[in-house]
Image (cartoon, rainbow, N blue to C red):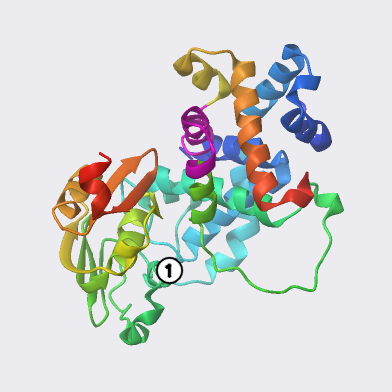
Amino acid sequence: MLHYAKMQRVARSLLFDEQESEDVVSDIFESLLNGQTVLVPGTEERYLMTSVRNRCLKRLRHEAIVRDYRQLTTDNRQEPEDERMTDIVEFVVGHLSEQEQRFFHLRFTEGCSYEDIASSEGISKVAVWKHLSHVITEIKKHFNPRSL
Amino acid sequence: MKPIDDKRLFLDMQEHPENYSDEQLEQMMAELDKEPDTEAAWKRFEKKNKKSYSSLPTLHFSFDRIAAVFLVAAFLGVLSFAGYRAFSGSHGTSRNQVEADTTTVKTQRFVYEVHDGDTIFRFENIRLDSILAVVSRHYGRQVVFRDKAPQHLRFYMTCHTTQSLDEFVEMLNMFEGFKLSQKFDILFVDSDEKKEGKQ
């Protein structure tokens, strides 16, 4: 499981829930096992990392963050299984600073640790946390204001 | 390692980091960056899925091989993902040749082949947004059309996955009507006016 740790890291940073994070990662492997997805050698890591990020973002977008408070609605509209999350990506590109976009990419697509990002950017880990917090808060504010 | 057990604290630290000391934030980051118990998680996954997958004749993979193998299986996922609903012929998609290392899938105007790891996409009179949906998925990128006009342009082209993404982008930029560029994991599409002016 070459990429599992990174995937789990991304999921935990977005969902902060061990079980939910594990579920997200498992779902991705399940879809591969089900043959729902074609992957060609050389593209695995990128696919896995993007998938885990997008599935977590999807949860942030559509669901209340605190699972305990989640309420069932009567809206049974099924979202297509679109892992690309173009709207969130467009939002990130259109509304966040260049630096925040870079942090977003490093943390949630590359799966870098806070330490790695801080070193590569030449800033403190706390500063990285604050930037990423702002990114996530902005995404939630835009796509799921009720979760705030 | 203590499990993550206070989601509310995490959310509050995320929304109001100014209310916490550097030490508290660093503690949270250390918690988030800790190495997960991969073995245990994988065993749980295996246990959970064993039953349902053992009944599928074409999927006798041991779970630890999956990351390396990434089976070439049904292509329907890609087709539906790429928005090929417009293709009336797509219902006739052939999946008979699905094997571990060779796959050929044909629609009326679209062919996808995999031979020993080399994938070939052949597009015939296909919209740019559909082409990019397929190719970007292969390269693990996302596509953002900053201008909508190029979405409807149609092309005939053949792409090999032995091509790097840079080569693919370069090839596409030889066409007129749009400009393709990369940033992080995103492929941006702009209309041709920006091709000259902005960059």
Measured from the top left, where is residue B196 in percent x and y?
Answer: 20, 45
Question: What residue span does the magenta drawing correspond to?
Answer: A93-112
Q: Main secondary structure of the magenta part?
A: helix
Residue at image coords 72%, 19%: B25
Q: Name the residue tied to disc 1.
A: B77
Q: Is residue A88 magenta?
A: no
Look at the picture and state if A26 lies above or below A11: below
Look at the picture and state if A34 lies above or below A106: below
Q: Nearer the viewer, residue B171 or B56?
A: B171
Q: Give the quarter of the figure containing the N terminus of chain B.
A: top right
Question: What is the three-letter code of the residue carrying label 1?
Answer: Gly
Left or right: where does residue B3 sit relative to residue B127? right
Q: Is residue A110 magenta?
A: yes
Look at the picture and state if B48 lies above or below A35: above
Q: Residues within 10 Å of mark 1 (few under 14, many from 20)?
A: some
Residue at image coords 66%, 29%: B32
Left or right: where does residue B153 sit relative to residue A34? left
